[in-house]
Image (cartoon, rainbow, N blue to C red):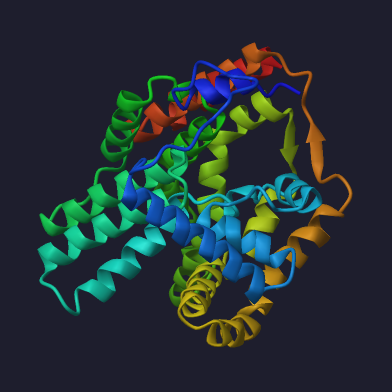
Amino acid sequence: ESFSYRDFLAAQGVYTYLGYPRTAALEGRAGSAALAALYRLRAAGVQVLERLYPPPEAQLMQGILLGVDECIPEDVTRDFQATGIAHVIAISGFNMSLLSGLFLSVLRRFLNRWWAALSAALALGIYALLAGGGASVVRAAVMCALALAASQLGRTSGGLNALALAGAVMCLFTPNLPWDVGFQLSFAATLGLVLYAGPLQSGFQRFLRGRLPRAWAERLAATLGEYLLVTLAAQITTLPLMVLHFGRVATWGLLTNLLVLPPQPLVMMLSGAATIAGLIWLPLGKLLGWLFWPLPAYSNTAVELLARLPGGNLDVTNLAPGLLALAYALLLVVTWAQRAGRLRSLWKPGAALVLAGL
């Protein structure tokens, strides 16, 4: 109900709407031939996926691989939103980082490290255009390209610097982008990963080392940390925005992420391979699709079952905007204290401030 079509168009640089236009096709070249070829390839990929998988898995893979989510059934979309796992459908940093490593590992077999990194960055840019060029896709592509450049220089990519540069470059070309909900959520989720994923994982590992054998502690911390704690880190910074824009909180979000995220790299790689095979020779793609179909089917079934659990959504529509601003202010203070090593000295006044706000 709060969706503004005017703001949606303005974020893409569109300020005028013609209700009843008359169009005429003109002879000659029109638009970019390269973009036209990418759009044709995208449309062909959508058609191939419809031939490889039954619904709704075909529509889910169209969203995960190609960024085409218009045909996903409404009940499926509601289930993914209700369980806090809707980010799996949208192409974002998770997908792009996986592709970045895949492109680089393949290209290094044929090119030296500089040309391989440059070619991988170019491939990421082409894929970002192929996937529709949305805010989260472009932001992820820019950050992955910066990480590739840093690795070739023998440096580690500064997450905050890369995120700030990616956001600044995108807003330079699209000044209205900060008001786009998708950009806000994508930027906030990445900020949470940069700031909190590492400290949460290291703290959890220290907690387990004091209670379990070292090998077991490291293995369990790596397994849970890669999915559960990373998801928690992203939700720390996106939760106030979710409350502000959607008025609800997915109470089963962490459990759903723990069950659904682990097979997603295989889902992407195997379904992507089946799609490419289907574009080349459809019978081969159908064979691979039949073999790989259980993975996306598992994801969809798990989300559907978890969405049916009672109490899956907590209604928070009545929260005052001031409380959301207070939440980000507290988060800023806690983050500063944690990075400055002063977190323990702030827990008492912080708790008092929270109680006063409530």
Does the image show residue 116?
yes
Q: In which quarter of the image is the C terminus?
A: top right
Does the image show residue 259?
no
x and y percentages locating residue 344 in the rendered image: 45, 32
Give the quadrant of residue 249: top right
| Residue 78 falls left or right of residue 355 | right
Q: In which quarter of the image is the N terminus?
A: top right
x and y percentages locating residue 183 in the rendered image: 48, 33
Q: How many marks?
A: 0
Instruction: Name the residue at the front extreme.
Output: 27
Tell me what residue is drawn at x 27 percent, y 75 percent: 106
Instruction: Name the residue at the right extreme.
Output: 310
Tell me what residue is drawn at x 55 percent, y 81 percent: 282
Placement of 350 over or under 280, stated as above or below? above
Tell me what residue is drawn at x 57 percent, y 87 percent: 283
Front-lying residue, 179 or 312: 179
Front-lying residue, 275 or 146: 275
Placement of 286 over or under 37, stated as above or below? below
Front-lying residue, 120 or 233: 120
Placement of 39 over or under 183, stated as above or below? below
x and y percentages locating residue 36 in the rendered image: 40, 51
x and y percentages locating residue 28 in the rendered image: 34, 43
| Residue 67 falls left or right of residue 129 | right
Front-lying residue, 318 or 294: 294
